[in-house]
């Protein structure tokens, strides 16, 4: 005779797995989701959350498979759709752009979706203007961590296009939103490229204060100092 598991018990297992995931008990969380899915293969959110653990364990094929199981049952589930875009982008799969465009069309006020779109476009070597347009939407919509990351990525695009003043401004904006040695460091590099050596030294000193052991920062600062 086959036993049955009550819906209340399944919900309790899900909550326990989520709590384990949030507190860093990743193996316990993985076992919890797998136990839950063995009882109910379509339990909402379980495949999505399991996929996150699989990606963290460097198992991208398994993670994408779990996401696709979730999306087959719930094609409009926001978290799973967004995670699929991110997974495809990391895998350099060109389907990422189409999925990201579908996501932003369905969620036009979601800053994280536009950040994902900008990242996917950059992966396909789309035009800089297309990438910047997506990132500009992410900057405007936020929230703050999304704004900071979108500013950082836009600055990288501008630096590659040799728009050093714009890149320096965006890297400076990042540093106002989060403590980021890399943003100060990159600002120092683009200011050096622009011939603004004094400002470059100041930016690199800020980077060194946040990451005093980084040899690359010390080297860049020494170079900018010699050019003064």
Image (spheres, rainbow, N blue to C red):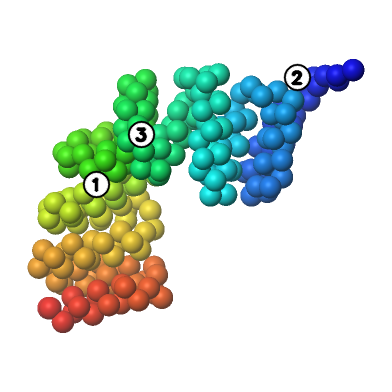
Crowding near pointer 1: few (<14 within 10 Å), some, many (20+)?
many
Return the residue nearer the eye: 112 or 205. 112
Position of residue 63 in the picture relative to residue 32 (left or right): left
Q: Which of the 4 image quadrants contains residue 198?
A: bottom left
Callout in the foreground (2, 3):
3
Q: Is residue 213 left or right of residue 73?
A: left
Q: Position of residue 216 (x, y in %)?
A: 31, 73
> Rounded to the nearest whole Å, what is the CA distance between mark 2 and mark 3?
35 Å
Badge 2 element: helix
Residue occupied by mark 1: 154
Residue at the far right in the pictured view: 1
Considering only vertical position in the picture, is 94 above or below 182?
Answer: above
N-terminal label among 2 and 3: 2
What residue is at 75 percent from the left and 19 percent from the top? 7
Is 127 or 203 nearer to us in this picture? 127
Earlier residue among tags 2 and 1? 2
Specify few, some or many for label 3: CA neighbours under 10 Å numbering under 14, 14-19, or 20 or more: many
Question: Alpha carbon of mark 3 to alpha carbon of mark 1: how far?
Answer: 19 Å
The residue singled out by tag 2 in the image is: 7
Q: CB of mark 2 within 8 Å of CB of mark 3?
A: no
Residue hosting label 3 = 96
Q: Nearer the viewer, residue 148 or 46?
A: 46
Q: Earlier in the sequence, mark 3 or mark 1?
A: 3
Tell me the element at label 1: helix
Residue 120: percent from the left, percent from the top? 32, 39
Q: Tally the marks.
A: 3
Q: Residues within 10 Å of mark 2 (few under 14, many from 20)?
A: few
- SS type, badge 3: helix
Q: Quadrant of residue 29?
A: top right
The residue sitting at 56% across, 39% down in the picture is 62
Tell me whether the residue at label 2 lies in contact with that at label 1, contact meaning CB atoms closer than 8 angstroms.
no
Q: Quadrant of the C terminus?
A: bottom left
């Amino acid at each position: 005779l086959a036993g049955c598991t009550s819906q209340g018990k399944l919900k309790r297992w899900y909550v326990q797995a989520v709590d384990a995931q949030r507190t860093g008990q990743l193996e316990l969380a993985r076992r919890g989701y797998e136990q839950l899915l063995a009882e109910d293969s379509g339990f909402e959110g379980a495949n999505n959350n399991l996929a996150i653990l699989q990606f963290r364990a460097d198992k991208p094929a398994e993670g994408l498979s779990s996401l696709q199981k979730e999306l087959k049952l719930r094609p409009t589930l926001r978290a799973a759709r967004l995670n699929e875009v991110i997974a495809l982008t990391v895998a350099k799969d060109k389907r990422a752009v189409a999925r990201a465009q579908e996501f932003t069309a369905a969620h036009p006020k979601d800053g994280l979706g536009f950040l994902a779109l900008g990242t996917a476009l950059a992966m396909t070597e789309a035009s800089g203007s297309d990438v910047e347009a997506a990132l500009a939407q992410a900057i405007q919509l936020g929230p703050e961590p999304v704004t900071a990351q979108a500013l950082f990525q836009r600055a990288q695009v501008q630096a590659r296009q040799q728009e050093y003043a714009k890149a320096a401004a965006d890297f400076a904006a990042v540093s106002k939103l989060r403590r980021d040695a890399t943003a100060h460091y990159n600002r120092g590099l683009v200011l050096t490229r622009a011939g603004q050596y004094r400002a470059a030294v100041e930016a690199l000193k800020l980077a060194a204060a946040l990451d005093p052991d980084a040899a690359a920062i010390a080297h860049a600062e020494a170079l900018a100092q010699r050019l003064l």
